[in-house]
Amino acid sequence: ETGVTQSPTHLIKTRGQQVTLRCSSQSGHNTVSWYQQALGQGPQFIFQYYREEENGRGNFPPRFSGLQFPNYSSELNVNALELDDSALYLCASSATYRAGGDNEQFFGPGTRLTVL
Amino acid sequence: QKEVEQDPGPLSVPEGAIVSLNCTYSNSAFQYFMWYRQYSRKGPELLMYTYSSGNKEDGRFTAQVDKSSKYISLFIRDSQPSDSATYLCVTSKSGGSNYKLTFGKGTLLTVNP
């Protein structure tokens, strides 16, 4: 079984640029959540995607956007990068069932974004 | 006030010690409580999961939740160098299909051989 993978591992951008981060879900998972982890902080929820639609959003501006594809992989796009966007971006996949229940989120290793 | 407050550490203990990690939360709507462990340069991984007050034990790990005081603890017995990691206290309002996780800041633990 393949776990959650993210690409790229590291990325350096300059202020004002745009960036796209990618995530492949664990096999059998249909829900993807994105988190931002600043240095020395816990992860903060950005948004979640289920069935290719945004399904919940944290306190992040609209320049943070995402996509989920039919194969359940996902992208996080950030426009007009700011210095404070420098962080580890984590993708987590989970399986959503009609009956609910425990739905552990499995995290990828993250993408380290540095904005100069 | 952050929704989940966690002792910042860092914490350094000798091998074999009992480790106590603590956090508090402010929102009564939080019903599910987790501890995630994050090794350096890795994503967080679920360690313990509970949705009720009381203790839950799994091997050397015990999670304790007191909803009346909004207090969460993780105890590690016979700590090992391999336990060296950042421990994240995590809550959510639902354990169902669509839930966001609210993380504490994390406590960096080092277990010295």
Image (spheres, rainbow, N blue to C red):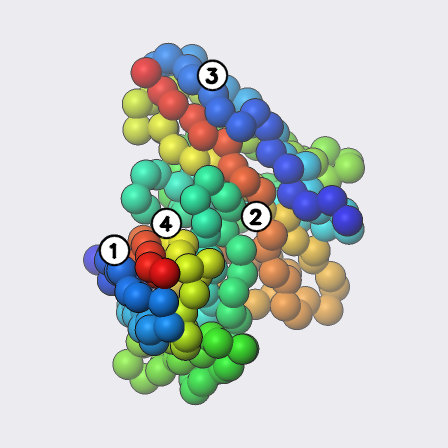
Q: For mark 4, what is the residue?
A: A42
Where is mark 3, residue-wise?
A18
Q: Look at 40% across and 56% down and name the residue there.
A: B84
Q: Using a 10 Å C-alpha cutoff, classify the residue at mark 4 as few (fewer than 14 neighbours), some (14 to 19) or many (20 or more).
A: many
Q: Which residue is mark 1?
A: B10
Disc 1 is placed on an element classified as loop
The quadrant of the picture occupied by the C terminus of chain A is: top left
- Residue contact at pointers 1 and 3, CB within 8 angstroms: no
Q: Element type at marker 2?
A: strand
Query: Depth check: B27 or B43 in front?
Result: B43
User: Please, which chain is the residue tagged with disc 4 on?
Assistant: A
Residue B52 horizontal/vertical position (percent): 48, 82
Residue A7 spot, x, y in % from top left: 59, 28
Amino acid of disc 4 = Gly
Residue B3 can be seen in this image:
no
Q: Is residue B96 above or below residue A29?
A: below
Q: Chain of mark 3?
A: A
Sequence-first tag of 3 and 4? 3
Q: Residue at x 38, y 23 (%)?
A: A114
